[in-house]
Image (spheres, rainbow, N blue to C red):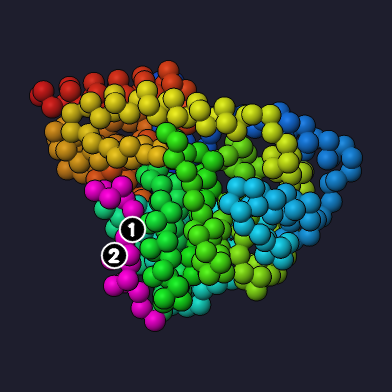
Amino acid sequence: MELAKRVSTLTPSSTLAITAKAKELKEQGHDVIGLGAGEPDFNTPQYIIDAAVRSMEEGHTKYTPSGGLPKLKEAIIEKFKQDQGLTYTAKEIFVGTGAKHVLYTLFQALLNEGDEVIIPSPYWVSYPEQVKLAGGEPVFVEGKESNDFKLTPAQLEPVLTDRTKAIIINSPSNPTGSLYTQEELAALGEVCLKHNVLIISDEIYEKLVYDGAKHTSVAEISPQLKENTVVINGVSKSHSMTGWRIGYAAGPEALIQAMTNLASHSTSNPTTSAQYGAIAAYTEDDGSVEKMRVAFEERLHTIYDKLVAIPGVSCVKPKGAFYLFPNVEEAAALTGHETVDDFVKVLLEEEKVALVPGSGFGAPDNVRLSYATSLELLEAAIDRIFRFVEAKRSK
């Protein structure tokens, strides 16, 4: 059987690959600490679970509109008003089966063959693959580690061409945890408006910011930028609802309608009970979201200093999300490994610590370490990495 060309170019997810290898070792009886997780380690808050169960008991088990329940759209619209001071209509909101599916649908609705999308690196692994699946061409621009991995207008403007359709801004970022300031977003936005480049603002980690930092959406900076931006968000990270698969987009009505039409021929609609859970997430509050944020912040502060004390390891301290993205190029060299990928592979084999190589994120000198796991396991993992580096470099 000959497969479609579009799937032959896909790069397997590095996160899923390392997770699979760690799981295999666990099943063999090894004490593996996996730090590849891209999801909170807390259960979904009980009030959300109760709302979903109640919806099923009340008979809400049928199809819904393709773009999401009206009540959920109302809750999302109110969330934007409260958090960003933004006003959207129901026709400017699309609800999909997770933010990943929303992004996929967006690219399918937006891109024509050969259209270019600017993707700052390091980047979330699915951005370039989804662009390619829609016939577009990813254009990578390196966010310098010296600038907290963030893109500048001076870097952006020279790479824009007459084929540039959009730019992706992910703040807070997966994998770096970097957070753009309002001033930085405004400067990038000015370039995008000048060249008629759509901004795709991925804000899925919006609620997970630390040390008093403030998340800013590029759409809230000016009416012009709002009209030129599609905001991507969801309840997966903020409310620990990764498996529920509810994400959404807010943006220009024509684009949102096109995405809704596409969804009507693919998923039909997001899972009905999950939508009712998301309504509860945005209309009720038992303090769980803030408790999770505080727990992540505590973990970050506890393990950061221990991580950078490892020989050959340096790390920009993140302001959001739940990832550390240390540069371990020197540590790899100290331990006799030619590449960071080799370092990660042997670390898993010998110390049973699973990290995600930065090569999958466009940053081959780095690794991604998720602190969405218990403090006890995080500290044990850092101790093992330290032991691994010390033992190897002393030989």
Expressed as whole percent of the image width and height from the top left, the position of residue 317 reads 33, 37
Q: Is residue 128 left or right of residue 258?
A: left
Q: For residue 384, which numbered disc appears in the image? A: none
Q: Quadrant of residue 274?
A: top right
Marks 2 and 1, how far apart at CA: 7 Å
| Residue in the image at 33% along x and 58% along y | 151
The spot of residue 357 in percent (x, y) is: 33, 43
Residue displayed at 49% across by 70% down: 198
Q: Could one spot residue 83 in this view of the protein?
A: yes
Residue type at mark 2? Gln
Residue segment shown in magenta = 145-162
Q: Are marks 2 and 1 in contact (CB under 8 Å)?
A: yes
Residue 363: tell me if it is visible: no
Name the foreground residue: 29 vs 246.
Answer: 246
Task: Tell me, yes or no, whether the highlighted magenta stretch contains residue 149.
Answer: yes
364 or 250, which lies in front? 250
In the rendered image, residue 40, in percent from the top left (x then y), is placed at 53, 34
Tell me the crowding category of disc 2: few under 14, some 14 to 19, or many 20 or more residues within 10 angstroms, Cα based: some
Q: Is residue 383 above or below residue 212?
A: above
The answer to if 224 sits in the magenta stretch is no
Q: Is residue 211 left or right of residue 110?
A: left
* Image quadrant in which the C terminus is located: top left
Mark 1, residue position: 151
Q: Secondary structure at mark 2?
A: helix
| Location of residue 278 by image quarter | top right
Q: Which residue is mark 2?
A: 155
| Residue 307, placed above or below residue 68 | above
On the image, the x and y values in percent for residue 147 come to 28, 50
Going 37% across and 39% down the picture, which residue do you hit?
318
Look at 44% across and 25% down and name the residue there: 298
